[in-house]
Amino acid sequence: MFLTRRFLPALALFVVGALSLVSCSDGETVAEAAADNSTQEATSTPTTTTVVSTTTTEPTTTTETAISDLELIALGAFEVGVKTVTVAGGTDRPLTVDVWFPIDDAGGSAPYEYTFLPGIFYRSPNAVSATFEQGSTAGPFPLVLYSHGSGGQRFIHSNFTETLASHGYVVVAADHTGNTLIESLAGSGGDLWTSLAVRPRDVNVVLDAVLATDGPTALNDALGPLVSDDPVVITGHSLGGFTSYAAVAGIELESGAIEPDDRIGAIIALAPLATVETLPDSTLAKIDVPQLIIVGTDDKTVPVDPNVERPWTLSPGSPAYRVELVAGEHLTFTDMCDYVTFLPELGTVPEFIVTELDDRSQEGCSAGDMPIARAQELTNTFAIRFLDAFYDDDPFIDPSSEALPEDVIFQSR
């Protein structure tokens, strides 16, 4: 059942996954392809009406029902602040957490810089550095928790997390220590199976920090007034999709059982990793919350079959929606295309890092892939419509009244 958000102003509207190596064709570099990729024109279905005819003993009458084109969602009414904090507790390692939250007036605040290493950063085009005290007075706001993919970073999909915050959501994302981009580049990351065991616990720890009512934590005291007591929506990319399912259903591991986190009320899975080895049938059968799955049709790292087919057919949660972006790939759901054009401009990034990111970004940033700007607007539109339906009882997308674009394959149940 969809739930109602407690309060939002009438003005308000609404990380790298498993890495892939492929080659660019015709000698084009990924940076060049990414630049071309971001400027291609979006296409949409031209259908505008459907005709329903009813024949009786009286003369035949024809009724025309208007169908509007799907309205794409851009940044919302709020400006966006970002703050980085450290969360400790529940695990044997601290978690670095980014928090995106609505603010009413950014004033002269500096653009936020997502920092990989000293001197190596990605400057946000939308968000600013802010304190929690600058949070919008229109709150409290629903909480969304984001989980990055294997070898990713807490801010790996900042276009997504910033857009959610601009529409009246508080978004939190932790670096899954031992499984981040920087650790991967340094060759110091842990193995996949270790990550499977600790990631759902990271979710528990972060939610405890944000939502706990007893005992001081790094987030609860300052951020608490901005966050409503509505159920949490969890979203994640690739291994973060696994994390989302595992946190909701609970999971049995050699290191012990992780119980379901009943604070989570819905899932948005982006190109989720959901093989039978990582998420057995019995685990997916416990997913009884609403879910939205968004994936690229051309994903080679985490192919649609079985990684989308399995949760789509085995999890009973309802309502459920499935969106496939035509020519989208695995890294379509990250900011990698922006990194490969922005980072070299700093002049401080070692050449081996530029080369490595260029190589790793090819699944999603190459010529022929869905243009990244197009992928961003589609991903954000479906996600925000899902969130608004979950929290506000707004209608979700109905193809009988909204014409979907030709580069989207949509299913619902």
Image: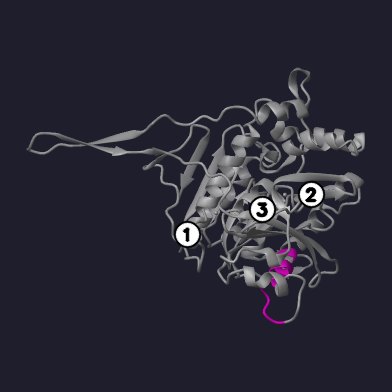
Amino acid type, mark 2: Glu
Where does the image place residue 298, in percent across and percent down from the top left?
63, 34
The residue positioned 86% from the left and 47% from the top of the image is: 184
Tell me, yes or no, if residue 309 can be seen here: no
Amino acid type, mark 3: Gly
Q: Which residue is mark 2?
A: 113
Tell me, for residue 10, which label it has, or none. Answer: 1
Looking at the image, the residue that sits furthest to the bottom is 214
Q: Secondary structure at mark 3?
A: strand
Where does the image place residue 263, in percent across and percent down from the top left?
60, 70
Looking at the image, the residue that sits furthest to the front is 108
What residue range appears in magenta?
A: 202-214
The residue positioned 45% from the left and 37% from the top of the image is: 404
Amino acid type, mark 1: Ala
Which is nearer the N-term, disc 1 or disc 2? 1
Badge 1: few (under 14), some or many (20 or more) residues near its Cα, within 10 Å? few
In the figure, is residue 17 to the left or right of 408? Answer: right
- Per the model, the C-alpha gap separating discs 3 and 2 is 22 Å
Please name the predominant secondary structure of the magenta segment in the image.
helix
Quadrant position of the N terminus in the picture: bottom left
Where does the image place residue 86, in percent across and percent down from the top left?
81, 65
Tell me, yes or no, if residue 240 can be seen here: yes
Q: Which residue is mark 3?
A: 236
Tell me, for residue 409, which label it has, or none. Answer: none
Badge 2: few (under 14), some or many (20 or more) residues near its Cα, within 10 Å? some
Q: Nearer the viewer, residue 121 or 3?
A: 121
194 is higher (above) or lower (below) than 29: below
